[in-house]
Image (spheres, rainbow, N blue to C red):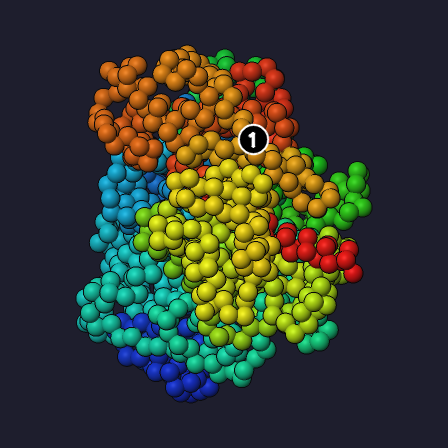
């Protein structure tokens, strides 16, 4: 039996994709009908496209902007090589970044060359190419790589499960530090930790080419320094040591299972070509022409692989070529190791004869859309030439929040259908993060609009499909530890964690070694025959009970039977036998329950569950009907899998014979089993995260992240959530602005997905990109908020309507939008802003912002008058004002003694005709908290936020401010009540805090919470530790530089152990006080820690001490209540300014009320 991949007949009904592993061998076949005219491939191309396609052999880089026809250029280049240069098709390798792009390219080539010739080039991903090469030459890898022939591929789920086991079983990882008590909470904590570690390992593998360079701690340190800057800090060393340790354990676990993860497919391939001259020569003979798409998204390992496939000396010798296509303006994968700079000087250095060609003509988007995209990217962007006429205006909506965004998007989609005839499949909603999709999906469901979430689970990622394929891998090689781990208790057969731990110990870390000694069940290895029986295990040595030993023997017998079936029947029959023999469908109820648990956990983690609208069970499906519906779905999908295997066998595509590369390999390979392995490889690669569009069954709106939309295009695009802190996302430290530049490119990519209709939506604090679009003069159409008006009446909407009526009554000549003045007044600077509001009195645009040094103005009125005199405010006179002051407020006035300023509401009204309110700075923070987006919060303890429930604000800074927020039904919003609770006596926990309290009390006469819970309190704790136990703190002492900032910095970089302990004690004290505030107010709306200290020490905050002190499980009462109360750290430094703006807007509402009563 010979087979390969997934036949393209299944691209429709079965939702299965053609395989990505292509054979890297073959003879030259006669060209298809498309080769009759050597100039045919250039027909219909523009001049710049023709120049790129016909570039001479050697090294060429085509810089292709969005919508410039780069895919067509790549296809035409292959045709040009075959038809104009008489190149053998099998000597061409075209490397893409997604399976979808590879399928599209292969289909187009089939149309041009005919199926036989089109099958000869390698067309696939970097991972597919690497796996093909490793299958043929893994025996030539150095022993240190620890991968043996016949290795399995651990997909993302398998790698995550492996790391989760390591996290749970390794000493020193206490998941209780996160505040997790329930089993579900603990699972989420372990899953999160595993994701963080795997992400770090993946970045390391992708940034340090080759296994020779991967030395755990050293490689991690190198990656950290590249990503965080060149400074070698103690913090980097500590993190590198910890992550390097995790990497070595993960690598050991993979080796025990003879498995490689997806990143290994690249690292191992680079190592193979670096270390094996035979492999290099074989590949050099095989491939003469290399084409790479999306080159700007290559990481260091992929770039090294390109250099090994196309050495510069071979290109300079003759008929060989390297053809790269990319666009630095669309480089959006720096977060996973991509190096867009490889398109620049690095490429010119490595390939001195590089020829650069450019595709500037855009055939996708209107000139309106391209102008907007260019405005976001900035003056450094390349100017695209629009080939389409001027299109509809760019629409911009400012709404109240995510729910209103979803509602507006749904209504606009219906309008596009009705007015412009845009099909649903030509509409996309692009979000920055998966967490944004929920409001969009809920609105689409309410309006009965079909949709599909791109980037969700594909057919190959379904649990039942992965389970049956794991059984197939086990039947092929019983020592496949990854497969064995997945299905040993699926369906449930009573082999729980305790039994698996005993088997793992007996097998010296490998369950497979304990169950299947090397001599059985396959005599002569994987290619050999199946033993008729297995000798019984010694249950006494294993520590198993008789009942458990019986279950283990039953599983071994099952594995033996599956191995025999695979070697005696066609693949599709073997798969059907697996489904029947394992009783998989009988366990459908349990499988459905597990899937549901995973979906709930995913949604709580803020990740998309990846379902399509048509995959979701009907609302009426309950009880037995729902179970039957689940069983039918499982039968259908597993039936599809069997059909896929049947068609793959009928296709008769060749396997992967190693001998064609001239490499020495073992003889006697079973052709049937080689076909099975090729089939499994294809399935593994198709299950990899693709980012491309899933096969759509019906006319459906596409809901996608911005990243997943790369390479796609739609008639209409909606971009909700254009909010500062979301797009662009919060900046990273020490990256020199690289993150912001990538966010600009991401926005650019999102805008250029649209052909005709482009709509942006924002709320709260609009993204800086919105302001740049407005300032650039792009055509922006602000539409009315008819969607909000059609919703149930809301107090703010009624007030806005009354306010508009009052303006028409009192000042009919004035037509400009209302605006408000806000200011945050500190000891050094006064920060003034004027905001323009929309028709529902929500912020729509920042008109002017200025920082005025307080020392330059004798009085507050002098500073205010200077700001209001700015010419930029012409036509934007504010109608109300709010001022936040760092001092106490009494009877509408605040006197700042250190400045000699008095901010008085009555004086502002008398001098400037402005209705104003004066707030304490903590009070302003309190009003800002309810309007913060989720992206501005770090969750330390997860619990539902109850609507309109009390909230608490805690602000450690110069002092320790405390405030409670209570819902006021009369005004339809929260009312902030500041308190002096921080002056209460400090309640220490543990002997060291009691000693601290005694020391402060001896010095000051009283130890309040504020004395040890503010910035100066951190210094007191540091001094106390030095005087109490100086000998236990080796290393440097901060001496006179022991201010809070210096102590925090020394704690973070690890240079001063005393500073580290002082910071931990300080954080614990603040966490405990947060718990006390929650108990006093039963603040089920959440406790919010604000101020500038916590965001600067997030690494220590995340360590768990704050949440642990908040819950205080040593108490018999605290955590019973506090487990229901969420705890957050506010990351938005402007939260006080947001609250001040909310109060200024509220004054406008009150004006509307007053006018309404008077009239």
Q: Is residue 883 above or below residue 283?
A: above
Give the secondary structure at mark 1.
strand
Q: Which residue is mark 1?
A: 979
Residue at horizontal 78 percent and vertical 44 percent from the top = 621
Give the side of residue 906 with respect to residue 269, left or right. Answer: right
Where residue 132 sits, quadrant-wise, is: bottom left
> Does residue 1027 appear left or right of residue 1065 in this picture?
left
In x, y percent, where is residue 437?
Answer: 60, 53
Residue 462 vs residue 895, the one in the foreground: 895
Q: Nearer the viewer, residue 945 or 538?
A: 945
Quadrant, the C terminus? bottom right
Nearer to us in this view, 61 or 922: 922
When the figure is inspected, residue 234 is found, relative to residue 845, above or below; the finding is above
- At x 26%, y 17%, the residue is 1030
Q: Residues within 10 Å of mark 1 (few under 14, many from 20)?
A: few
The front one of 1033 and 603 is 1033
Does residue 996 sit above or below 411 in this rendering?
above
Rendered location of residue 625, percent (x, y): 80, 42
**Residue 180 pos. (x, y %):** 55, 28
């Amino acid at each position: 039996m010979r087979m390969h991949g997934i036949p393209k007949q299944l691209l429709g009904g079965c939702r299965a994709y053609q395989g990505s592993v292509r054979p890297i061998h073959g003879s030259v076949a006669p060209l298809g009908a498309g080769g009759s005219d050597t100039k045919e491939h250039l027909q219909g191309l523009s001049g710049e496209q023709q120049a790129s396609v016909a570039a001479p052999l050697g090294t060429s880089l085509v810089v292709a902007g969005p919508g410039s026809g780069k895919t067509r250029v790549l296809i035409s280049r292959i045709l040009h090589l075959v038809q104009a240069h008489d190149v053998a098709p099998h000597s061409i390798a075209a490397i893409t970044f997604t399976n979808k792009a590879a399928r599209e390219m292969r289909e187009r080539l089939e149309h041009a060359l005919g199926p036989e010739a089109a099958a000869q080039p390698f067309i696939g991903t970097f991972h597919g190419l690497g796996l093909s090469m490793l299958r043929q030459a893994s025996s030539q890898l150095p022993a240190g790589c620890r991968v043996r022939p016949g290795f399995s591929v651990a997909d993302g789920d398998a790698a995550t499960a492996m790391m989760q086991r390591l996290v749970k079983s390794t000493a020193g990882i206490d998941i209780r530090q996160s505040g997790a008590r329930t089993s579900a909470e603990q699972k989420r904590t372990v899953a999160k930790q595993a994701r963080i570690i795997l992400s770090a390992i993946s970045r390391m593998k992708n940034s340090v080419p080759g296994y020779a360079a991967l030395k755990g701690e050293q490689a991690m340190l190198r990656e950290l320094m590249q990503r965080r800057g060149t400074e070698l800090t103690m913090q980097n060393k500590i993190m590198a040591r910890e992550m390097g340790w995790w990497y070595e354990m993960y690598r050991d676990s993979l080796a025990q299972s003879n498995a490689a993860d997806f990143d290994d497919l690249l690292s191992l391939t680079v190592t193979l070509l670096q270390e094996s001259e035979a492999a290099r020569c074989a590949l050099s003979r095989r491939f003469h022409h290399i084409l790479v798409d999306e080159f700007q998204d290559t990481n260091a390992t992929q770039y090294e692989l390109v250099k090994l496939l196309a050495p510069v000396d071979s290109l300079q010798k003759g008929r060989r070529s390297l053809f790269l296509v990319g666009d630095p303006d669309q480089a959006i994968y720096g977060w996973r190791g991509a190096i867009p700079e490889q398109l620049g000087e690095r490429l010119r250095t490595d390939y001195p004869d590089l020829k650069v060609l450019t595709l500037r003509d855009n055939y996708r988007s209107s000139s309106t859309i391209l102008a907007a995209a260019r405005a976001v990217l900035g003056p450094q962007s390349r100017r695209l030439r629009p080939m389409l006429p001027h299109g509809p205006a760019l629409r911009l909506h400012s709404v109240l929040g995510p729910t209103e965004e979803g509602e507006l998007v749904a209504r606009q989609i219906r309008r596009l259908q009705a007015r412009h005839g845009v099909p649903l499949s030509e509409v996309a909603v692009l979000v920055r993060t998966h967490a944004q999709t929920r409001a969009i999906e809920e609105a689409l469901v309410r309006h009965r609009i079909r949709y599909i979430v791109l980037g969700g689970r594909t057919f190959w990622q379904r649990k039942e499909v992965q389970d049956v394929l794991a059984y197939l891998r086990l039947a092929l090689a019983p020592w496949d530890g990854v497969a064995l781990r997945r299905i040993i208790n699926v369906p449930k057969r009573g082999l729980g964690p305790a039994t698996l731990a005993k088997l793992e110990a007996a097998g010296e870390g490998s369950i497979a070694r304990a169950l299947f000694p090397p001599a059985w069940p396959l005599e002569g290895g994987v290619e050999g025959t199946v033993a008729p029986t297995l000798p019984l295990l010694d249950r006494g040595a294993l520590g198993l009970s008789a009942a458990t030993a019986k279950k283990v023997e039953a599983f071994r017998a099952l594995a033996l039977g599956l191995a025999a079936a695979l070697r005696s029947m066609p693949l599709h029959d073997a798969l059907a036998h697996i489904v029947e023999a394992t009783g998989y469908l009988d366990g459908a109820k349990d499988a459905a329950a597990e899937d549901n648990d995973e979906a709930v956990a995913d949604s709580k983690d803020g990740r998309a569950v990846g379902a399509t609208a048509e995959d979701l069970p009907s609302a009426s499906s309950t009880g037995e009907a729902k179970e039957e519906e689940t069983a039918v779905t499982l039968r259908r999908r597993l039936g599809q899998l069997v059909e896929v295997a049947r068609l793959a066998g009928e296709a008769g595509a060749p396997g992967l014979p190693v001998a064609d590369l001239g490499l020495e390999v073992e003889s006697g390979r079973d052709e049937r089993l080689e076909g099975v392995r090729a089939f499994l490889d294809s399935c593994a690669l198709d299950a990899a995260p693709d980012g491309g569009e899933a096969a759509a069954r019906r006319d459906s709106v596409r809901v996608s992240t911005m990243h997943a939309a790369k390479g796609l295009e739609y008639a209409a695009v909606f971009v909700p959530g254009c909010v500062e802190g979301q797009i662009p996302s919060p900046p990273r430290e020490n990256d020199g602005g690289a993150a912001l530049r990538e966010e600009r490119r991401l926005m650019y990519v999102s805008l250029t997905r649209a052909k005709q209709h482009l709509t942006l939506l924002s709320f709260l604090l609009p993204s800086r990109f919105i302001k740049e679009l407005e300032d650039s003069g792009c055509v922006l159409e602000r539409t009315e908020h008819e969607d909000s008006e059609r919703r149930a009446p809301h107090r703010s909407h009624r007030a806005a309507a009354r306010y508009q009526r009052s303006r028409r009554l009192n000042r009919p000549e004035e037509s400009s939008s209302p605006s408000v003045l806000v200011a945050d007044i500190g000891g050094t600077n006064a920060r003034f802003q004027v905001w323009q509001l929309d028709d529902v009195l929500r912020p729509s645009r920042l008109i002017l912002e200025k920082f005025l040094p307080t020392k330059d103005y004798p009085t507050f009125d002098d500073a205010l008058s200077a700001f209001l005199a700015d010419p930029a405010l012409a036509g934007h006179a504010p109608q109300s004002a709010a001022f936040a002051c760092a001092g106490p407020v009494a009877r509408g006035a605040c006197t700042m003694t250190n400045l000699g300023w008095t901010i008085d509401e009555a004086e502002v009204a008398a001098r400037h005709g402005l209705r104003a309110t004066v707030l304490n700075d903590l009070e302003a923070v309190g009003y800002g908290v309810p309007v913060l987006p989720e992206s501005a919060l770090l969750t330390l303890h997860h619990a539902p936020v109850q609507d309109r429930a009390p909230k608490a604000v805690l602000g450690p800074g110069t002092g320790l401010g405390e405030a409670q927020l209570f819902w006021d039904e009369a005004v339809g919003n929260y009312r902030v009540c500041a308190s002096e609770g921080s002056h209460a006596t400090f309640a220490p926990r543990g002997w060291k805090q009691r000693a601290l309290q005694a020391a402060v009390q001896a010095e000051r006469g009283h130890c309040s919470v504020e004395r040890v819970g503010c910035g100066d309190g951190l210094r007191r704790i540091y001094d106390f530790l030095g005087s109490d136990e100086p000998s236990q703190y080796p290393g440097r002492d901060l001496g006179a530089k022991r201010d809070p900032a210096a102590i925090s910095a020394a704690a973070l970089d690890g240079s001063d152990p005393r500073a580290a302990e002082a910071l931990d004690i300080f954080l614990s004290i603040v966490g405990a006080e947060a718990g006390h505030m929650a108990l006093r107010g039963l603040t089920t709306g959440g406790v919010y820690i604000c101020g500038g200290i916590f965001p600067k020490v997030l690494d220590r905050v995340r360590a768990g001490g704050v949440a642990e002190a908040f819950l205080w499980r040593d108490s018999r009462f605290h955590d019973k209540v506090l487990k229901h109360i969420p705890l957050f750290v506010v990351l938005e430094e402007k939260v006080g300014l947001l609250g001040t703006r909310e109060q200024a807007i509220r004054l406008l509402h009150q004006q509307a009320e007053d006018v309404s009563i008077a009239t």
